[in-house]
Image (spheres, rainbow, N blue to C red):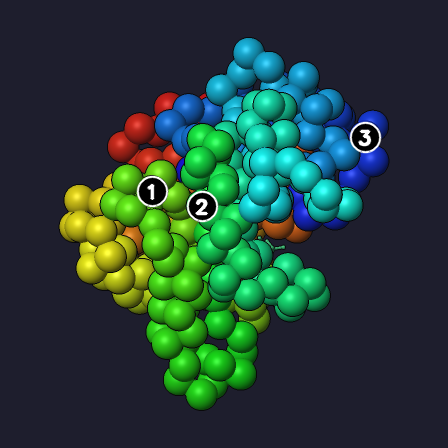
Amino acid sequence: MVVANWKMNGTLVEARALASAVREKLRRARGVEVVLCPPFTALAAVAEVLAGSSIGLGAQNCHWEASGAYTGEVSPAMLAELGCRLVILGHSERRQHLGEGDALINRKLHAAVAHGLTPLLCVGETAEERRQGLTFHVVEGQLRGGLAGASRDGIVRCMLAYEPVWAIGTGVNATPAQGAEVHGSLRGILSELASKEVAQAVRILYGGSVKPENVAPLLEEPEIDGALVGGASLQADTFIEIVRKSAPRAGSAAKE
Ligand code: PGA
């Protein structure tokens, strides 16, 4: 699975053009589920472009209530109405710049599940935390905090993204071994919180400087189920190359 996080980029005209180019060029790619997450302002336009294709639509955030006096916010019900199937929650940029903590993210996660959206819960350590040997401690806290109170049925409807903060937008990706190690530990916690079956069913994506050059070795790790792509998702050709290189080797139908 490859999820594009466009972040706060793109005018409506640019969003339409990018989504159209991805749709057009992805026709020949098979075996990989693709979801585009444009900014809120472009969701309706991109939904129109993607209608009738197998490419999914996702959002980058949501509120925890279905409606109400929350100026400037967007509810999970509104996203579901637009055809979103997924919502990114707990991205490190929101944790860092908007002060989002695990308790808030947890409320959003419950609301997203209640409205039929798949939460893509992001976790990841900073460079300093990694240096101090706190990586597993940090991601465990974020995972347990984000999923608090979720039932087994709720957890199975979630997806995770391991996004080391030091790898986001820096050009320095985690190595496949570093990714696999953290993904494995997240799966272990899922298995404790829910069950082994649920832990196997929940997809765990890697994010942080994913590029056409590094995606294949990352996804060759059995623990890594896909990629969350930021910067490299803003160019249709680059993004398509990432999708092609993400296709399972055996099902090489994704190659032209
Ligand atoms: P990046 O961002 O691919 O630009 O590093 C990934 C993300 O923040 O989701």
Using the numbered discs, state the Cα–Cα distance from disc 3 to disc 1 in whole angstroms: 34 Å
Q: Which mark is residue 110?
A: 2
Q: Say which label, 3 or 2, has the lower sequence index.
A: 3
Q: How many marks?
A: 3
* Three-letter residue code for mark 2: His
Q: Position of residue 54 (x, y in %)?
A: 49, 20
Ligand 1 in which quarter: bottom right
Percent position of residue 50, x then y: 61, 19
- The local crowd at label 1, few if under 14, some if 14 to 19, many if 20 or more residues have their Cα within 10 Å, is some
Pointers 2 and 1 in contact (C-beta within 8 Å): yes
Query: Looking at numbered disc 3 in the image, what kind of residue is underneath it?
Result: Leu
Tell me if residue 13 can be seen. yes
Q: Secondary structure at mark 2?
A: helix
Q: Residue at x 49, y 72 (%)?
A: 125
Q: Considering the numbered disc 3 on the image, is that residue within a helix, a strand or a loop? A: helix
Instruction: Tell me, for residue 154, which label it has, or none.
Output: 1
* Crowd rating for badge 2 (residues with CA inside 10 Å; few <14, some 14–19, many 20+): many
Q: Nearer the viewer, mark 3 or mark 1?
A: 1
Amino acid at circle 1: Gly
Q: Residue at x 68, y 48 (%)?
A: 7
Residue 12 circle label: 3
**Toward the viewer: 117 or 13?**
117
In the depicted structure, whether residue 228 falls above or below residue 100: above
- How far apart, in angstroms, are the residues tagged by discs 3 and 2? 30 Å
